[in-house]
């Protein structure tokens, strides 16, 4: 079976592959979620195969869900037979006929070097920001003829791991495709950002003020030492974030927003599994067709809940971090971010779940609940997206 692309590339993909080729087949594509980075990777695979027919390909992904999705995408998008693909955790062992290996990063940490000791290899790392940590960097070790990193957000906040580790291993950013580009190309739907301020109780306000003062003092101390972070600073941020996530009025406000969108397909995000379970129970009592999706329910039940959501058997899926990266749920009309971390990367991933195009879907709505400590980051985001999105503020 001859490998071939199943549909014509987009303009940005054609330009990006020239950049990648001209950079000795190395580099990172920074592409907004839903922009077509997986298909771009297939273009790179096919392009490099024309140069070297004997090359093998290792695709490293962060999750089992993404592993399964890559398997389907390669078969459908690149016309590769299933017999040519080894899917780690599904297939028993690597055989001579396997030209493409798909592996979750936890396994790649221990297998990548031994794989490349035989034959010639190209490395593709999806959601490559995950490979920057000390342990996950082991997955990048090996003798690679070509490398490609993919991410909507390759740069990590608060550290220099991107420049110190990802660029030397994978190459520089060779292409950027942002929300403005995607909107112009009709790759994403029109969307609204609706930001709802959560009122705090007097006790919560007092605790937040104390933590904010401690954060300001710690930032001043480490700045004098020429540092940007410290374990104490990160711990203080975490304490303030948890205080915000557990704000008394956060869930009641979220339920009110859900009722305003009754009958629409909704993804609801929270950081805490116990809160996700609580929201699911409360929505069920209100008459919503709802299920939950997070790491503390069985893999079988997660798949059942996800399938029912994708097929329209249920309208609302409540999740924690499990859907931040990877799975396509393009028919989602409304995303409600009840609570999140301070990570800009996480917000971009979650927004991308909502903005994918789908038949009959004219607009995506992203509702974010925030407290005062989150306000500056949301205002910065609003200034970056005001040309492509209508932005509304509530409770200010």
Image (cartoon, rainbow, N blue to C red):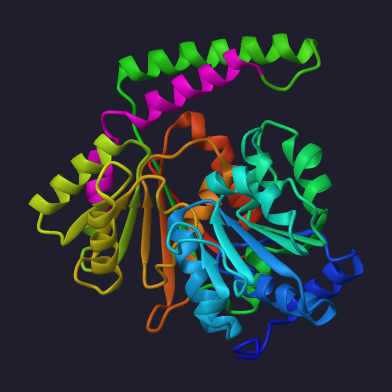
Question: Where residue 336 sits: x, y (%)?
Answer: 36, 52
> Residue 270 lies in what quarter of the image?
top left
Residue 375 or residue 157, whichever sits in front: 157
Residue 281 or residue 375, whichever sits in front: 281
Residue 161 or residue 299, whichever sits in front: 299
Q: Is 345 rendered above or below residue 14?
A: above
The span picked out in magenta is 230-258
Dominant SS in magenta? helix
Left or right position of 257 against 100: left
Residue at screen point 66% across, 46% down:
139
Residue at screen point 60% across, 75% down:
97
Residue at screen point 37% across, 83% down:
360
Question: Where residue 83 sits: x, y (%)?
Answer: 52, 78
In the rendered image, residue 300 lying in the magenta stretch gets the answer no
In the rendered image, residue 256 lying in the magenta stretch gets the answer yes
Question: Where residue 151 sits: x, y (%)?
Answer: 64, 56
Residue 130 seen in the current view: no
| Picture quarter with the C terminus | top left
| Picture quarter with the N terminus | bottom right
Residue 50 seen in the current view: yes
């Amino acid at each position: 079976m001859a490998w071939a692309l199943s549909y014509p590339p987009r303009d940005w993909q054609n330009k990006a592959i020239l950049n990648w080729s001209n950079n000795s087949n190395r580099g990172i594509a920074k592409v907004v979620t839903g922009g077509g980075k997986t298909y771009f990777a297939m273009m790179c695979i096919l392009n490099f195969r024309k140069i070297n027919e004997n090359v093998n390909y290792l695709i490293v992904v962060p999750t089992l869900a993404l592993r399964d999705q890559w398997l389907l995408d390669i078969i459908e998008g690149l016309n590769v037979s299933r017999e040519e693909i080894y899917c780690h955790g599904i297939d028993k062992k690597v055989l001579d006929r396997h030209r493409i290996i798909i592996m979750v990063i936890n396994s790649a940490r221990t297998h990548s070097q031994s794989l490349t000791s035989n034959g010639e290899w190209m490395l593709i790392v999806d959601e490559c920001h995950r490979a920057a940590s000390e342990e996950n960097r082991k997955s990048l070790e090996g003798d690679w003829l070509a490398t490609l990193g993919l991410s909507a957000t390759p740069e990590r906040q608060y550290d220099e791991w991107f420049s110190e580790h990802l660029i030397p291993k994978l190459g520089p950013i060779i292409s950027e495709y942002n929300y403005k580009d995607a909107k112009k190309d009709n790759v994403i739907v029109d969307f609204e950002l609706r930001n709802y301020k959560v009122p705090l109780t007097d006790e919560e306000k007092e605790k937040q003020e104390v933590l904010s003062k401690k954060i300001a003092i710690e930032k001043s101390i480490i700045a004098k030492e020429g540092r940007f972070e410290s374990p104490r600073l990160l711990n203080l941020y975490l304490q303030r974030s948890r205080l915000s996530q557990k704000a008394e009025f956060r869930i009641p406000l979220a339920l009110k927003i859900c009722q305003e969108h009754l009958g629409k397909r909704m993804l609801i995000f929270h950081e805490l599994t116990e809160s996700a379970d609580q929201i699911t129970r409360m929505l069920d009592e209100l008459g919503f067709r709802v299920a939950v999706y997070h790491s503390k329910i069985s893999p079988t039940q997660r798949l059942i809940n996800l399938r029912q959501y994708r097929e329209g058997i249920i309208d609302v899926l409540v999740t924690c971090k499990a859907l931040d990266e990877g799975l396509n749920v393009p028919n989602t009309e409304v995303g409600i971010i009840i609570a999140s971390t301070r990570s800009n990367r996480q917000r971009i991933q979650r927004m991308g779940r909502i903005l994918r195009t789908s038949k009959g879907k004219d607009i995506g709505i992203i509702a974010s609940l925030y407290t005062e400590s989150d306000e500056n980051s949301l205002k910065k985001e609003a200034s970056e997206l005001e040309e492509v999105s209508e932005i509304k503020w509530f409770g200010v």
